Image (spheres, coloured by chain):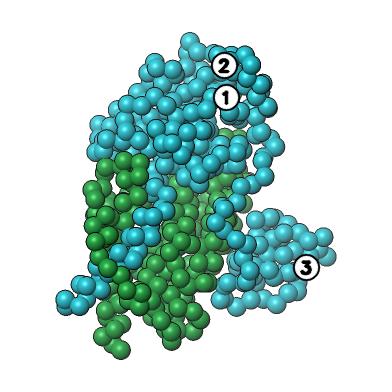
Chain colours: A cyan, B green
């Protein structure tokens, strides 16, 4: 028994040490719509650092009024001169959150500048699977930066998201406006139009080399004509209605998933 | 032989708990105080390589594996099953073709991945699941519970799409965290490659879902 306990402790270290070294913080949440700055980062619609891999990790001590939770690695979130896309909204806005951990919550707060414009008190409850708040922006117009704060009930921390809005617009959708920055130094070059409609090259995780082998073990259907129910693995080439396609994602062809209908699974070759 | 197998199981059970704890440890980087200091205590122990290795002859899948590989598979199987359950809701409830298409891809890809992962654990003679309730001490917070499926099933149209996308984005963020941990700490080449695939495809899914939310 003693031997077993020793082994367990030893293995715990083996795993714990490696995770501790480089793990992204596990969790927890950010404003997904209208898209927060980190949501635009995660979409690759603006070039960002590591926050693009973990938009849910903008976490720091409560009481801050910045966009990055005071985390140096996420400092760009505070950079108002960066060409953050803005979202056109009316004066009634629904803010929705992605949560990867449903922490017991004290309050959800929304600020413009230092002014608290809305607060929702959860009284320490665990939030539902989805969280949406309706916030009234009456009295505000033009470009506004909203700071949304999720105050956790049982820790000293909060999660921070900044959302760039164009208030008084059409009231919905992501309308990428050129977003003038009126309060900024006039020598600042005009921001380039928000790249919402012209995505930047997709940032691929830096540590991920291309696959060099077909790694799956399930039986494959030899190349040939695509068929319903066929099992396909990465690299398989099939013909469908005279056109060749290469399989991008291993799958079984359930339902009517002919190659042209599911571009995530099949790449057209010619 | 029997004894060593039993020992390995015990080790793995403990590992599952420690994974939870060691993930907690990463919170300390940003000052997270919710979960105590469970992860840091492991650092006082010593490690020997052979303990965590699966070694050879464990099954038909070539290549040695380590405890991180096993835990990744054990955690990803239920995670992906839940993802498939969620995705299946979209066929009849979503009002958007793009959402239905994406959900169909998830059902296809993740169903197959669950089979691959299950077969691999079986070939390795490892339990298909981590010890029950291993994450309870952590509050089970990172798991999308069955009640979420029920909650979403009651919705339709635009309300469904907003809730569905937010839930699934969060669910896939957690899958990405697990996959990145496996890429860093796993040993079995096929399993590490599977984690890389998951990382690539689900990052793209998250992008598409975020775009869909605000369109």
The residue to which callout 3 is attached is A239
Does residue A2 appear in this view? Answer: yes
Identify the mark at residue A184; answer none if there is no mark: 2
Residues tagged 2 and 3 counted as in contact (Cβ below 8 A): no
The kind of secondary structure element at disc 1 is loop
Residue B167 position in % (x across, y down): 45, 45
Dividing the image into 4 quarters, which one contains the C terminus of chain B?
top right
Real-space Cα distance between discs 3 and 1? Answer: 50 Å
- Provide the chain ID for the residue under circle 2: A
Identify the mark at residue A81; answer none if there is no mark: 1
Residues tagged 1 and 2 counted as in contact (Cβ below 8 A): yes
Counting labels gives: 3
Residue appearing at x 50%, y 22% in the figure: A145
**Left or right for A30, reference A199:** left
The correct choice, above or below, for A212 with respect to B209 in the image is below
Q: Earlier in the sequence, mark 2 or mark 3?
A: 2
Q: Earlier in the sequence, mark 3 or mark 1?
A: 1
């Amino acid at each position: 028994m003693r031997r077993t306990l020793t082994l367990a402790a030893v293995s715990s270290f083996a795993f714990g040490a490696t995770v501790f070294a480089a793990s992204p913080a596990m969790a927890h949440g950010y404003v997904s719509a209208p898209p927060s700055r980190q949501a635009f980062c995660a979409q690759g619609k603006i070039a960002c650092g590591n926050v693009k891999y973990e938009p849910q990790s903008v976490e720091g001590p409560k009481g801050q009024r910045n966009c990055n939770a005071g985390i140096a690695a996420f400092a760009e979130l505070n950079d108002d001169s960066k060409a953050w896309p803005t979202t056109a909204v009316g004066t009634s806005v629904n803010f929705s959150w992605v949560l990867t951990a449903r922490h017991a919550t004290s309050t959800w707060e929304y600020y413009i500048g230092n002014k608290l414009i809305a607060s929702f008190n959860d009284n320490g409850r665990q939030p539902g699977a989805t969280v949406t708040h309706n916030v009234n922006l009456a009295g505000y117009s033009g470009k506004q930066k909203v700071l949304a704060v999720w105050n956790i009930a049982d820790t000293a921390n909060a999660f921070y998201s900044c959302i760039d809005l164009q208030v008084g617009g059409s009231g919905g959708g992501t309308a990428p406006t050129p977003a003038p920055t009126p309060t900024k130094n006039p020598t600042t070059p005009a921001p380039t139009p928000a790249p919402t409609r012209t995505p930047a090259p997709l940032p691929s995780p830096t540590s991920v080399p291309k696959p060099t082998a077909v790694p799956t073990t399930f039986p494959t259907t030899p190349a040939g004509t695509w068929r319903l129910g066929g099992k396909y693995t990465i690299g398989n080439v099939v013909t469908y209605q005279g056109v060749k396609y290469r399989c991008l994602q291993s799958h079984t062809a359930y339902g009517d998933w002919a190659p042209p209908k599911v571009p995530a699974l099949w790449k057209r070759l010619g | 032989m029997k004894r060593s197998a039993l020992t390995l199981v015990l080790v793995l059970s403990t590992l599952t708990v420690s994974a939870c704890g060691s993930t907690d440890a990463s919170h300390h980087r940003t000052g997270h105080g919710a979960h105590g200091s469970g992860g840091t205590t492991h650092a006082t122990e010593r490690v020997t390589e052979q303990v965590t290795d699966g070694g050879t002859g464990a099954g038909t899948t070539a290549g040695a594996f380590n405890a991180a590989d096993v835990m990744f598979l054990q955690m990803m199987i239920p995670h992906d099953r839940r993802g498939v359950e969620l995705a299946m809701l979209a066929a009849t409830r979503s009002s958007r073709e793009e959402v239905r298409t994406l959900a169909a891809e998830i059902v296809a890809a993740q169903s197959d991945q669950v089979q691959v992962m299950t077969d691999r654990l079986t070939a390795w003679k490892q339990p298909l699941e981590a010890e029950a309730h291993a994450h309870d001490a952590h509050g089970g917070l990172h798991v999308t519970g069955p009640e979420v499926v029920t909650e979403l099933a009651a919705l339709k149209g635009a309300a469904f799409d907003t809730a569905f996308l937010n839930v699934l984005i969060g669910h896939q963020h957690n899958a990405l965290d697990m996959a990145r941990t496996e890429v860093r700490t796993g040993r079995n080449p096929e399993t590490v490659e599977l984690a890389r695939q998951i990382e690539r495809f689900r990052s793209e899914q998250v992008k598409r879902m975020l775009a869909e939310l605000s369109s």
